[in-house]
Amino acid sequence: MNSTIKASTKSAFHTVSNMEFTGVFDTIINNDFTSQSKYHLFIKYGDKVYMEVKDVGEIVISFAELQNNNYWKYYYDLSLMLTNSKNLVIQDLKYSSEYNDCQLYNEERFWSIDTASIENNIHINTLMVVNYDNNCYYKINPYDLENMEYTSQEDFHNFLMIYMAKVEFENNTANNMWASYYNLVVEYRANLMEKEVEEMTAVLQQL
């Protein structure tokens, strides 16, 4: 692993040049009182990919296997556009962590990523990208991926069956969600790039 670490009193910021940490977190707000969230989290190390999906589980597969599934590729491509720094993973220091979401995850988690998220408010008919959302926490220590075995065929099959059942349900309940999310995130990334160009131009003009 090629990593550098900067630490504060509450977090350690790990920049790992040969790993990528990305994710998609989206929330559907039904009304003023109820909402539902889901996530796709990815860690890429060489050809090895760790993928974790809410209410499905986690698997370790090859990058080719990820690319061969249209839904997984869709979320992975979204994650690359939403994540602000794909080589950065943030470690909450155990005894000073501010993370305290007992509803989203079933266990304590301490490794997160710097990413934007999608908020779909069907109550007031709005769809937006929230620029920073610290809800994406990995179940594993990302450094463990290097020595993790690929998921067995049996476990892979079980994961796939559960996942595709959820996809079928979403296809029946969320009209045009896939295209709407993709177009939203492409526009978000384009606006960020435009802003970066404007800032760079302003700096150059001062030279």
Image (spheres, grey):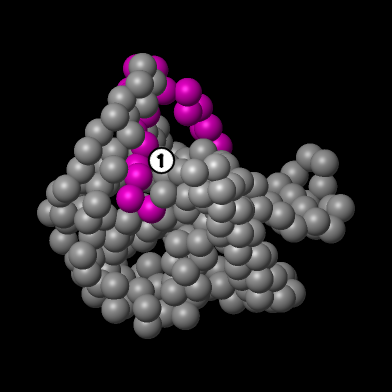
The structure residue drawn at horizontal position 33% and vertical position 50%, both measured from the top left corner, is 87
Q: Which residue is nearer to you in this view: 87 or 144?
A: 87
Who's the residue at 29% across and 72% down the image?
A: 63
* Residue at left offset 50%, top offset 27%: 100
Helix, strand or loop at disc 1?
strand
Q: Which residue is mark 1?
A: 112
Type of amino acid under label 1: Ser
In percent of width and height, residue 103 lies at 55, 37
**106 vs 175: above or below:** above
**Residue 200 % position (x, y):** 52, 51
Q: Residues within 10 Å of mark 1 (few under 14, many from 20)?
A: many
| Range drawn in magenta | 86-104
**Which residue is situated farthest in the right direction here?**
124
Rendered location of residue 19, percent (x, y): 26, 55
Q: Nearer the viewer, residue 41 or 57?
A: 41
The answer to whether residue 26 is left or right of residue 108 is: right
Is 148 colored magenta in this rendering?
no
In the rendered view, does 27 fall on the left or right side of 163?
right
**Residue at (84% x, 58% y) in the render:** 125
Query: Where does residue 74 sit, x and y in percent of width and height?
Result: 50, 73
- Secondary structure mostly seen in the magenta stretch: loop
Is residue 55 something that shows in the picture? no
Q: Is residue 117 left or right of residue 42?
A: right
Q: Is residue 96 above or below residue 192?
A: above
Q: Could you say which quadrant of the image residue 28 lies in?
A: bottom right
